[in-house]
Image (tube, coloured by chain):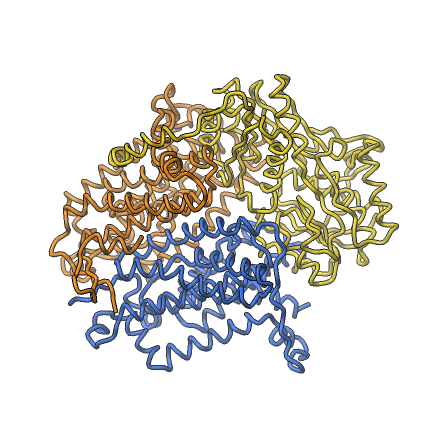
């Protein structure tokens, strides 16, 4: 069958060879692989916005390519190798599950730069890791939620119990407790990153159980739309979702990968790229807050002050004293949590209801 | 009014057996060219990257083998099921069950390291897959429960169970609490065939062996005869003294074991650890592969490579000319439609009734385009 | 609270119910179309696209129905006219549907949708506990109930329904009686496609008014399970859909209350429940035999 195909397409091939575009050598080629479709309007969509920013910034000097919906598994390594062989100078692998394949392929192609998002392995000098401190934004959201909620209970739709999500819950809680020490948060694990229907169901379940403000660490706009229908407030996720819920969204954490991508591609052009582990937050411009809307002026002022404290004064949401859920002291007064501990976080802070799934 | 009419051939046409894939390919290329032009891409470029580019380099041929191996392995097992009229739709779940069962050794007993580990893993993988397949088989044989549905439901259960394992009890202690098991140690890795040339591992050898063995069993042995008789006519089978409920178990166990072997080969070969998602739907795609290969193990080998090529080609087209992933999938769907449709010609003549001149053969297929 | 939980369950159940009731008719005619997921996602994208472009959700619903039916005819042509294998063709249809819907949908990503509003029936909707659940719902909820009643009536109380069932039970004798087997199956397949399209529109116009790639997220497969779960009886499909909805919403509530079972096990519950019920139903051999279309999945080629 394969031979058959070959024979049949041989004539086509001859023509296509002539027609296939020649690679321009003077351009820098930057490539991305995404775990989801760019149409998820969430995680992969935001990374793709970063790609578009790179195109806009560099214009003719850069060539880009991407692969979407790349499964985490045997296919990842092939996708990376295909990119490496197709002349990419720098490859951004944007999902945690791509970690081991990145190391394997990077070993084979020492001249190509690999950038892995949200991972921790840098086995070779041509591998860097990067991530954003989204939990800084969640701290601000916690402050707003505690101010806005009448019942003192927020609903939190979570995706999967990984450190990234757990640190978000904890930061949200610490932010809320800074305003109201008795604040409660109820958590539902949806076990999905994007299933709009299920996220909507989770939001409804939380609202029926008496929460009066919701936030989410899943990708779709559905929870916000549910909040709008029920006339309560909520937060967006990953991008500014204000047009989906103009009277509902208080603010949103905007993942802005553009500045980082532009910086790294520039370094490749200049020949100054070096291995690094970047965990940028508000200060670096990687995490932004959508405009504060639908809240009284005093809340808005407090939210802006909190944002400023993190952005300009270097405040870390995980600053002691912080107690674990079981009441034991985790961080002493004034002590700041080391990044390593935050990146592997697998416990709730005091005040969070329920048990962390193991 | 005009309509199509099928006339059964007295015996299947050897000519169309050989030619129908060509007709299908030609039709796919025409339809594909139209679609690519509408999308503003050069159709020749697109077809080139789709069908030729992945075959140009050695490393890519290795990748083709990696992608085709699980598809072939699962599909040959399924062919036994489908030939005997047992509808196992849950190979995806059996694939996962095999990977979990085979993964017990390197994950739970990481200190047990010697040359026995890999063979034991493979055997445990086969047992795991077969055991998982025995559930719908038993329910069908004992209670007459519809196996399409039970096997499908068990897929979701297996996926969620694996998810729970790698996030909970089997999580890598040194992995920063991320959802994955520890890396398999060196004794637990399925070796690559030619490490200097590419990644292809023993999985493809297992697949080809399974295909040849099952081809022999189905064609040349009494068991194979039994399978085919029971599939075509359960009543005739009963007269011949064959037991349908026995066959339910046998066919499910075979296909489950092969799916399980595919699962453990995939994780110990191409992946090297367990993680929440280990299969991009191989168990479902293999169903299509089984039918594309006309339920003949050797045909399935060819079909497996074609489908694998369509995945690799889709990626190549995405990278080089920016053809979107959705277009690649739609093209894949079209390819399948044409191949399935053209295979009708093997068993039937096609007439257009209502025209003054009755036409045969290709005419019918062309209306499909 | 009970009432809003009920409404949440209804929202989760309705798309499953609509898609399943269509597939039930298809299977009763002896055809197994595994392409429900693909037809549904096509309905979702057309429904959304037409609704946002024209501003009329009703036009969106109509378009979704038409596209669902047209898409299913592709399956019909292959399996009925060219007697290809139904299982493989259905799977290929899903693949095609997910691909094509993604291509069409690229233009609609990140657009707020148009929502089909609710219709409250005066007085009745004020009945305590169940009033809003039964009488203040979105129009497709009412349509789904009417569909179940209509299909049930059609199958068991009309001549045409009897004919359709006879085609599914024994196509050879139906053909011998002069019934046009293929034509009836085409009609059944188109009806199933129309229902799947409508179910898709429910997702993108009522459930979560937006377009996201692959937004059906496996609901087409669940609809297929429901048909067998219900042993091909329309009212049982309704019961099954609401049971499934109740279990999946129930597990979310269990989490909020703080029941600490790993959520994977809670998520797996509906699937395990389906298996158990399947076994319970099928233990009664007589009952399943009566309802199972004997020709399900078998191709029919009329002898001349």
* Quadrant housing residue C211: bottom right
Left or right: residue A202 compared with residue B152: right
User: What shade has chain B been given?
Assistant: orange
Residue A27 rendering spot, x and y as whole percentages:
55, 23
* Quadrant housing residue A139: top right
Look at the image and tell me whether residue B346 can be seen: yes
Query: Residue at (57%, 47%) from the top-left corner?
Result: A40
Look at the image and tell me whether residue B201 can be seen: no
Residue B110 rendering spot, x and y as whole percentages:
49, 28
Front-most of residues A128 and C82: C82
Query: Residue at (53%, 48%) from the top-left corner?
Result: C106
Query: Residue at (56%, 22%) from the top-left corner?
Result: A113
Left or right: residue C75 compared with residue A358: left
Left or right: residue B22 compared with residue A125: left
User: What shade has chain A been given?
Assistant: yellow
Residue A49 rendering spot, x and y as whole percentages:
62, 39
Q: How many marks?
A: 0
User: What shade has chain C been given?
Assistant: blue
Q: Residue furthest right?
A: A298
Front-most of residues B353 and B20: B353
Residue C167 rendering spot, x and y as whole percentages:
28, 71
Query: Residue at (72%, 50%) from the top-left corner?
Result: A235
């Amino acid at each position: 069958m394969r031979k058959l195909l070959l024979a049949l397409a041989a004539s086509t091939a001859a023509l296509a060879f002539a027609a296939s575009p020649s690679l321009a050598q003077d351009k820098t080629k930057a490539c991305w692989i995404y775990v989801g479709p760019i149409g998820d309007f969430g995680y992969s969509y935001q990374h793709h916005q970063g790609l578009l920013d790179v195109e806009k910034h560099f214009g003719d000097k850069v060539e880009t390519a991407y692969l979407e919906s790349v499964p985490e598994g045997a296919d990842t390594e092939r996708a990376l190798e295909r990119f490496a062989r197709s002349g990419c100078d720098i490859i951004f692998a944007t999902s945690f599950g791509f970690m081991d394949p990145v190391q394997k392929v990077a070993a084979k192609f020492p001249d190509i730069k690999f950038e892995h998002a949200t991972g921790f392995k840098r086995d070779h000098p041509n591998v860097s890791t990067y991530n954003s401190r989204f939990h800084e934004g969640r701290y601000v959201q916690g402050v707003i939620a505690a101010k806005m909620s009448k019942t003192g209970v927020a609903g939190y739709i979570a995706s999967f119990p990984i450190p990234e999500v757990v640190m978000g819950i904890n930061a949200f809680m610490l932010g809320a407790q800074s305003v109201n020490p008795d604040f409660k948060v109820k958590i539902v694990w949806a076990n999905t990153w994007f299933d709009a229907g299920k996220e909507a169901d989770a939001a409804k379940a939380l609202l029926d159980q008496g929460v009066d403000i919701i936030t989410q660490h899943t990708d779709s706009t559905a929870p916000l739309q549910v909040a709008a229908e029920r006339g309560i407030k909520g937060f967006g996720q990953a991008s500014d979702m204000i047009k989906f819920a103009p009277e509902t969204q208080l603010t949103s954490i905007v993942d802005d990968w553009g500045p980082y991508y532009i910086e790294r591609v520039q370094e490749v052009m200049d020949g100054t790229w070096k291995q690094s582990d970047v965990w940028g937050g508000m200060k670096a411009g990687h995490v932004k807050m959508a405009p504060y809307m639908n809240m009284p002026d005093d809340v808005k002022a407090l939210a802006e002050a909190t944002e400023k404290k993190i952005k300009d004064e270097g405040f870390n949401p995980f600053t002691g004293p912080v107690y674990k859920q079981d009441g034991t002291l985790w961080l002493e007064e004034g002590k700041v949590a080391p990044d390593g501990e935050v990146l592997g976080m697998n416990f709730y802070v005091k005040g969070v209801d329920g048990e962390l799934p193991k | 009014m005009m309509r199509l009419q099928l006339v059964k051939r007295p015996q299947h046409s050897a000519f169309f057996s050989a030619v129908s894939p060509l007709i299908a390919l030609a039709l796919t290329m025409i339809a594909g060219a139209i679609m690519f032009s509408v999308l503003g891409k050069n159709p020749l470029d697109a077809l080139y990257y789709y069908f030729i580019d992945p075959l140009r380099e050695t490393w890519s041929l290795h990748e083709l083998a990696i992608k085709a191996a699980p598809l072939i392995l699962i599909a040959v097992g399924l062919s036994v099921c489908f030939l005997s009229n047992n509808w196992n739709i849950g190979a995806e779940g059996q694939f996962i069950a095999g990977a979990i069962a085979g993964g017990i050794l390197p994950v739970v007993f990481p200190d047990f390291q010697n040359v026995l580990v890999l063979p034991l893993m493979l055997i445990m993988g086969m047992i795991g897959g077969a055991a998982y397949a025995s559930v719908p088989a038993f329910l069908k044989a004992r209670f007459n429960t519809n196996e399409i549905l039970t096997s499908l439901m068990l897929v979701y259960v297996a996926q969620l169970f694996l998810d729970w394992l790698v996030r909970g009890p089997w999580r890598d202690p040194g992995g920063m609490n991320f959802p994955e098991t520890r890396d398999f140690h060196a004794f637990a890795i399925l070796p690559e065939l030619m490490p200097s040339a590419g990644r292809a591992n023993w999985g493809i050898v297992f697949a080809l062996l399974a295909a040849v063995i099952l081809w022999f069993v189905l064609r040349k042995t009494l068991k194979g005869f039994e399978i085919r008789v029971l599939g075509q006519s359960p009543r005739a089978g009963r007269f011949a003294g064959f037991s349908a409920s026995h066959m339910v178990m046998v066919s499910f166990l075979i296909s489950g074991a092969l799916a399980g072997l595919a699962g453990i080969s995939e994780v110990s070969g191409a992946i090297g650890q367990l993680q929440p998602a280990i299969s991009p739907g191989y168990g479902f795609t293999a169903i299509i592969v089984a039918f594309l290969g006309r339920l003949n193990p050797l045909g399935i080998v060819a079909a497996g490579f074609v489908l694998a090529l369509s995945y690799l080609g889709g990626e190549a087209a995405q990278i080089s000319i920016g053809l979107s992933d959705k277009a690649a999938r739609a093209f894949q769907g079209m390819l399948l439609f044409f191949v399935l449709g053209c295979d009708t010609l093997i068993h039937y003549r096609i007439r257009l009734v209502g025209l003054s001149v009755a036409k045969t053969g290709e005419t019918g297929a062309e209306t499909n385009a | 609270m009970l009432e809003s939980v009920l409404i949440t369950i209804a929202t989760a159940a309705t798309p499953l119910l609509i898609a399943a009731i269509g597939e039930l008719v298809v299977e009763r005619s002896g055809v197994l179309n595994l392409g429900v997921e693909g037809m549904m996602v096509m309905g979702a994208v057309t429904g959304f696209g037409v609704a946002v472009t024209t501003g009329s959700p009703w036009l969106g619903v109509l378009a979704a129905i038409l596209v669902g039916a047209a898409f299913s005819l592709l399956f019909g042509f292959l399996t009925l006219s060219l007697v290809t294998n139904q299982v493989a063709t259905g799977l290929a249809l899903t693949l095609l549907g997910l691909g094509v819907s993604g291509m069409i949908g690229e233009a609609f990503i990140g657009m707020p949708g148009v929502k089909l509003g609710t219709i409250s029936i005066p007085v009745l909707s004020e009945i305590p506990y169940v009033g809003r659940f039964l009488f203040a719902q979105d129009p497709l909820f009412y349509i789904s109930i009417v569909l179940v009643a209509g299909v049930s009536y059609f199958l068991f109380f009309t001549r045409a329904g009897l004919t359709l069932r006879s085609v599914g039970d024994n196509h050879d004798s139906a053909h011998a009686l002069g019934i046009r087997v293929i034509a009836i199956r085409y009609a059944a397949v188109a009806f199933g496609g129309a229902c799947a399209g409508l179910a898709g529109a429910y997702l993108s116009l009522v459930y979560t008014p937006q377009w996201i790639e692959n937004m059906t997220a496996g609901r087409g497969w669940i609809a297929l399970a429901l048909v067998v779960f219900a042993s091909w009886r329309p009212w049982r499909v309704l019961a099954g859909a609401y049971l499934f909805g109740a279990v999946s919403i129930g597990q979310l509530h269990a989490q909020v209350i703080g029941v600490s079972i790993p959520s994977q096990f809670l998520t797996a519950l509906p699937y395990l429940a389906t298996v158990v019920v399947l076994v319970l139903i099928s233990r009664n051999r007589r009952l399943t035999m009566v309802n199972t279309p004997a020709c399900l999945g078998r191709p029919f080629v009329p002898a001349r």
